[in-house]
Structure formats: C-alpha cells, structure tokens
Amino acid sequence: MPWQEVSVMDQRREFVGLAMQEGVNRRELCRRFGISPTTGYKWLLRWGSGDDQLADRSRRPHLSPLRSTTETEALVLAVRDEHPAWGARKIVRCLERDGSEAPAGSTVHAILRRHGRVEATNGTSGKPWQRFEKPAPNLLWQMDFKGRVALANGAACHPLTIVDDHSRYAVCLRAYGNEQSETVRSGLEATFHRYGLPDALLVDNGSPWGAGPGQGWTRLGVWLLKLGVDVLHSRPYHPQTRGKNERFHRTLKAEVFALRRFRDLGEVQRAFDHWRTIYNLARPHQALDQEVPASRYAPSRRAMPASLPRIEYDEHEIVRTVGTTKTYVSFKGRLWKVPQAFCGERVAIRPRGADGHYGVFFGSREIAQIALADAAPCETGARP
C-alpha cells in the first residue's frame, strides 16, 4: 500500500534509515513499505542532498510557457484597478476595444485571482431565466429611486435613476435630497429636453408615482399623460419586474458608493456625472454581448413640447371640469367621484354600451365609471 495518511514524513525517514543499512535489499524494503523503487530512491537521493524533512514539494513547473506575459498582466490589472467592480469579460472587451491583445476570460480571471483582486467563490448554478427587453430604444424607460444614502454633512441623498429598457442607457442619474413629486418632475423635464419623450415609463407602486397598489393616478402621472407618456406600474411586491433598474442600482452601489462617503449632494452629482459617462460609453455590458449601452441607444424623435398640450374633446361630447377642492363631477343630477389627481382637469363622460353605464375619460384614458343604478356615487375606477 502507498504511504499512510498519518506521519507520512516519519515513515519516509524510517524508510531512509533502514535503506541506508549495510546489506539491506532496498527493492524488497520498497515492497514492504508499499512504494515503488523509483520513489524509494528519490527519498534516498533527497536525504543524501541534505533534506532531512522529506516534505512534499510543489509540482509547479519551473517554467510556464503558456502563462501570460508581464505586460499582459499589467494591462489587465490596470483596467481592474481603474474599475474595481469589473469582471473578466468586461476587461477582455475593454482590451480588445483599445487594440490590445486580450487573453481569454478564464485567463484574465486567473490573473485577477493570482494578484489578489478576486477571491474564489463556491458558486451554485441558478435557476433558468429569461431576459425580456423592448425591441427599440425609448419604447420603455425604467425609473426608480435607489434609496436613501447618508452623507457626511448629515443630509441624505436619494439617487433618481432612469434606464432605457432596450439599450440599458442611463438617461438620468441625479442626486436629490428628497423623493417628492416636484423633484421627480424637474428631473424628468431636464431628461425629456435632452433625450426626448419615451412611449412609457415603468415604475413601482410607491410614492411619488403611485399611492400604493391599486390606488390609481397621481398628479405626476397626469402630467406625463398630457405629454403622451404612459405610466406602467410593476406588479406589487415583485421588484424583478423592473429588473434592469434593480441591476443598475447594484452596479451603481458597487462602482460609486462602495467604501466611499460623500460630503454633500454636489460631490455625489459630480461623481454621478463622471460615472454615467463611463457606464454609457465605456463599460461593456454582459446583456449587450459586451457592447456599451451607447451602441444601442438613440434619442427619441418625440421632442419635449414648449408647453403642455391641451386635452381636446369633440363638440357632441359631455364634458365636465373636476372641481379644484372636491373630486366630483356632476352628471344626471348627481355627483360622481373621480381620482383626486384630476382636480381642475376637463373630462368627458361617454356611454359604455350598457344602459345606465358610462365611463369618465381624460383624453382616451378611462379614469372612473358611472352606473346610474347605483344608490351612491361610484368609487374611483381601477386603473387599467
């Protein structure tokens, strides 16, 4: 049998001691110790050269002809040090784009591990998944606040992020001190003036773009509706619906906020402006086959108008103006409730086919329902 697990070096020293005795049959001794003659003579040779420990030596070759050159490793480490959150595939793409000879992704990962830039992980295979995206830019933007980030001056930063669904292009990354509707609107106005209007915005159900699951319209949503921008709400308690925005937040945390404390909002915004350029124009994206978001993005052809369009209705329609203090419209001698977000707005009341049933519309969107048979005024209709 081969060397036993316990006291291996003691057994080796015992073998050498016996093998050096005068007149001993060394081949027979090797058989009794369960080793080959080649192994036995190896230990005798090492003992004779002064190695009295007989410990295992590294089997690593003295020369590694396939190992990356020092220059290649330096290039890999330079990209990694400039972008500490980038993995091997992004580094490979960056080197290729710069005209350098890039090694394989596995080789880059080995370089990073060898120089202590990454640690080995015991990963497990995840569940099968599918990626969904719009076929062109500006059909859908995903918008959200990343969450409160404490600043050194005692204030808080609330990063507002907007990512194009098709290209992952970050059209907005702003450092704000609150999450109020007016703040979001100012950020959207600046973004719309630069990149144009999207067809729709995907948001969650919380403030300021929602009042909770199933709670209907907000003033911000009405403003967007006037611009021709639809507001889509994700499924309640399913943040994966806005997966691209959630992934953007993780990247933002890793590449901007990790191990760094900002003094004030101005310093955060300067960091945002610098990093957004890198993210859009230089950082390879795995979901885009290691291309950059800018390679798939173009501004919308729908420009931000100078003033809000007025909602027009046909002459024959029944038009009412929602009160500024009471959220009701008058119809058939009774008051009918509409969402508070439409205070002061003009709405149309249109038959819905069945006798005594009407819909309350803002433009082409139904915002409430009327049933004359009801004993009490109708409640706000569920938002489609």
Image: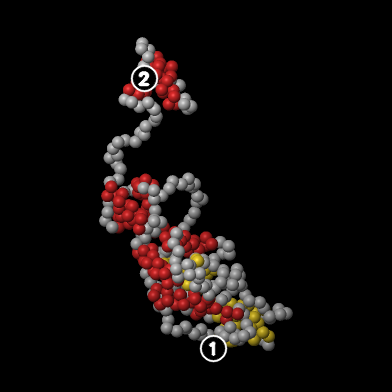
Residue 239 % position (x, y):
54, 62
Which numbered disc flags the more N-terminal residue, 2 or 1? Answer: 2
> 125 or 72: nearer the eye?
72
Question: Which callout, 2 or 1, points to the residue nearer the camera?
Answer: 2
- Residue 37 — which label? 2
Q: Estimate the x, y position of residue 261 in percent, counting from the top left.
A: 45, 64
What residue lies at 28% left-to-right and 40% top-to-bottom? 65
Residue at image mark 1: 315
Residue 361 in sight here: no
Is the N terminus in the top left, top right, bottom left or bottom right quadrant? top left
Three-letter amino acid code of the residue under disc 2:
Pro
**Nearer-the-camera pick, 334 or 286:** 286
In front here: 165 or 266? 266
Quadrant for the C terminus in the image:
bottom right
Question: What x and y, as percent, mark residue 275?
Answer: 39, 65
Left or right, 383 with reference to 117: right
Q: Nearer the viewer, residue 3 or 207?
A: 3
Element carrying mark 2: helix
Which residue sits at x=58%, y=83%?
343
Q: CA distance from mark 2 to mark 1?
A: 107 Å
Residue 317 position (above or below residue 241): below
